[in-house]
Image (cartoon, rainbow, N blue to C red):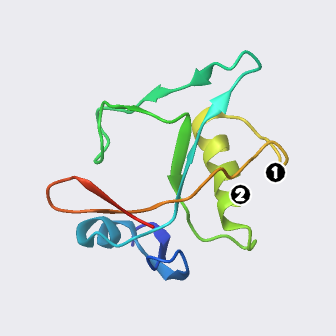
């Protein structure tokens, strides 16, 4: 059994949980976090994705991010930001330095282009 990730409708309402492989194979909309880390001089941390990744391998990417998985807390986005930050950067921040600056629903289609909704 694979990772269980929150799926959403095009209006952003959570539908439930589904396995990562099923979500990516079928282009199902799902929750993820993409986070930027900036220092006091305005410099932004970026990372180059591993060449072994199944999506966007070897490409430059956000500071850290990932899929939103099952949480006990109802603050799903913030809880997953904290989880990904710990996993990818080894940091352990609280909720206070996090700012949600927007959201966008995107669906991958067979040509790998992204179509935005909303």
Structural distance between the alpha carbons of marks 2 and 1 = 7 Å
Rendered image: mark on residue 95: 1
**Mark 2 nearby-residue class (10 Å; few <14, some 14–19, many ≥20):** some
Q: Which mark is residue 13?
A: none
Task: Tell me: residue 118, above or below residue 87.
Answer: below
Res 64 quadrant in image = top right
Q: Answer with left or right where residue 100 lies relative to residue 19.
A: right
- Looking at the picture, tell me which residue is in the foreground, 35 or 93: 35
**Depth check, front residue: 72 or 97:** 97
Assign a secondary structure to mark 1. loop
Which residue is located at x 55 percent, y 33 percent? Answer: 63
Where residue 76 appears, x then y in whole percent?
A: 67, 67
What residue appears at the point 38 percent right and 66 percent down from the top-left corner? 20
Name of the residue lying farthest toward the left: 111
Which residue bears the numbered disc 2? Answer: 78
In the image, 14: left or right of 81?
left
**Helix, strand or loop for disc 2:** helix
Instruction: Please provide percent x and percent y for residue 72.
Output: 72, 73
> Residue at the top extreme?
41
| Residue 10 vertical position relative to residue 89 in the rendered view, above or below | below
* Left or right: where 58 falls relative to 38: left
Q: Are marks 2 and 1 in contact (CB under 8 Å)?
A: yes
| Whole-percent x, y for residue 31 in the image | 51, 65
Above or below residue 112? Residue 105 is below
Residue at the bottom extreme? 15
Residue depicted at 68% across the width and 20% down the height: 42
Location of the N terminus (image quadrant):
bottom left
């Amino acid at each position: 059994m694979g990772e269980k990730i929150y799926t959403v409708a095009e209006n952003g309402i959570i539908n439930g949980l589904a396995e990562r492989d099923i979500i990516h194979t079928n282009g199902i909309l799902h929750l993820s976090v993409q986070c930027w880390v900036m220092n006091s001089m305005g410099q932004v941390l970026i990372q180059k994705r591993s060449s072994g990744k199944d999506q966007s391998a070897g490409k430059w990417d956000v500071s850290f991010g990932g899929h939103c998985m099952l949480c006990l807390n109802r603050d799903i986005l913030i809880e997953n930001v904290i989880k990904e930050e710990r996993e990818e950067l080894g940091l352990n921040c609280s909720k206070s330095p996090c700012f949600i600056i927007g959201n966008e629903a995107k669906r991958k289609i067979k040509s790998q282009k992204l179509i935005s909704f909303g």
